[in-house]
Image (spheres, rainbow, N blue to C red):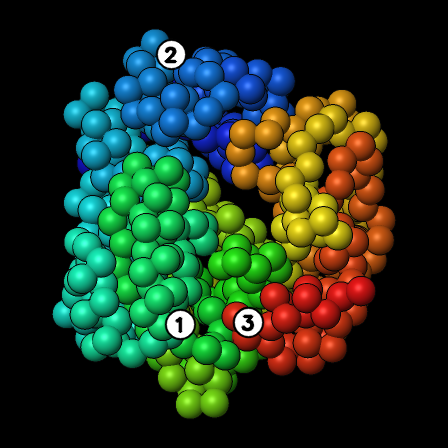
Amino acid sequence: MARPIQKLLVANRGEIAVRIIRAAHELGMQAIAAHSSADRDSLAVRLADDAVEIGPPHASKSYLDPEAVLRAARHTEADAVHPGYGFLSENADFAAGVERAGLVFVGPAPETIRIMGNKAEARETARRAGVPVVPGSDGPVPDLDAARAAAARIGYPVLVKASAGGGGRGIRVARDQAELDRELPVAQAEARAAFGDPGVYLERFVTRARHVEVQVLGDGERVVHLYERECSLQRRRQKILEEAPSPALTPAVREKLCASAVQLARAVRYRGAGTLEYLYDADRGDFLFIEMNTRIQVEHPITEMVTGVDLVRAMLRTAAGEPLALRQEDIAVRGVAMECRINAEDASRGFLPSPGTISELLLPGGPGVRIDSLAYAGYKIPPFYDSLVAKLVAWAEDRPAALARMGRALREMRIEGIATTLGLHRDLLRSRELVTAEYDTTTLERWVASRP
């Protein structure tokens, strides 16, 4: 049943909060920024119609505090809450709490998040739906003995992964039992700190695989896909550069991959924007499901650029009860888009975080160039959160032209006052691996280690 949203609480920060606020304004909604004390001067707060402080800088006492967010929603008389990505976006209890408060949760139903947001349960759901999965443990491993037994059955090397994870956090590689003994408690601690849930499961570590993900949209009854993104260029499981479509897939593999994503999303009656992640073995030509992100993704702009579909606006409309307007036959990929994540990190010093004040900012422009950012000249980047400063996106009619356009945009872009990864991206764009598209999930770390 349709329920118009007039006032939207944005329960996030940074560039994704800015992105949601802009989409809300385009739909005629008021947007309220829920922010920590460290983000009083953020761009999201400046752009919002209203703002409410929900706690001190540390996320556990602000952005990760469900009661603080709900108090803010009640205080501002919001109709709906958009959680963005990270923080509470895949917390089923929070989604249920939003609905119990009589508000609209902009995302899937709480039960869907509970099933698919828990990576171990998602794997079992995929199996039942007939989608191939990476071999792994039967759900979370309760202790070290269970982890050892599961690893022996799966075969080393294995990944230790947070059950409630996302964004590359709570993931460790164990190549033998000694490494498993060491890395399991570390992954559990990381999972507890990042997601409030120490649960982890094991998965076979597929070497030299490509990381390909499929974007879906649903309204709870009908699901469509918006094709795939290539996300293999990662450092410590954190994505650095993404492109759409994947240069590795044949049309036949693409069709099968996207069909499997729709099949799984339909099985859980998916509502909103979601992403199904796979490992693709180009030598064998097969793909294996690893997890689903029941939220908007950081890299969603490249899908928007190649399909022309505004994913955040679609999320808001389906959350308000509107049926999905898109038909699968209406969605096509045009051209190639790439996204460079520009972080406040010093790549020459082991990617040391570089919070501080941006003294000068020059953003590139021109045809096919898009910037999603939290930055402005004079803004002080706080040390408490993810180091992402901006997402630079370039679209062109084919891959060589997209590489050239991204290269030009990177050369134009200037951020002074803090260290950033701009230089790393400029070098990466000229690398043989990227130019030829001959890369996998292990390529970037080798390339970084080989840099002078």
Where residue 7 appears, as percent x and y from the top left, is 39, 21
* Quarter assignment of residue 1: top left
Residue at image mark 2: 76
Mark 1 or mark 3, which is nearer to you? 1
Q: Residue at x 76, y 66 (%)?
A: 451
- At label 1, counting other C-alpha atoms closer than 10 Å, the crowd grade (few under 14, some 14-19, many 20 or more) is some
The answer to which of 25 and 430 lies nearer the viewer is: 430
List the single residue furthest toward the bottom: 284
Note whether residue 219 is visible: no
> Above or below — where is 44 with respect to 292?
above
Name the N-terminal-most of marks 2 and 3.
2
According to the image, label 3 marks what residue? 442
Instruction: Name the residue carrying label 1.
Output: 175
Secondary element at image label 2: loop
Whether tag 2 and tag 1 are in contact, CB under 8 A, the answer is no
Residue type of the residue flagged with mark 2? Thr
Q: Position of residue 281 (x, y in %)?
A: 44, 82
For label 3, the SS is loop
State which tag comes first along the sequence, 2 or 1. 2
Foreground residue among 381 and 304: 381
Closest to the camera, between mark 2 and mark 3, is 3
Name the residue nearer the viewer: 189 or 204.
189
Which of the labelled discs sits on residue 69, or is there none? none
- Please, is residue 171 above or below residue 264 in the view? above
Q: Amino acid at mark 1?
A: Arg
Q: Quadrant of residue 62?
A: top left
The kind of residue on which mark 3 rests is Thr
User: Above or below — where is 438 with respect to 264?
Assistant: below
Q: Would residue 71 appear left or right of 167 to someone viewing this image? A: left
Residue 420 in sight here: yes
Mark-to-mark CA distance, 2 and 3: 47 Å
297 over 61 or under it: above or below: below
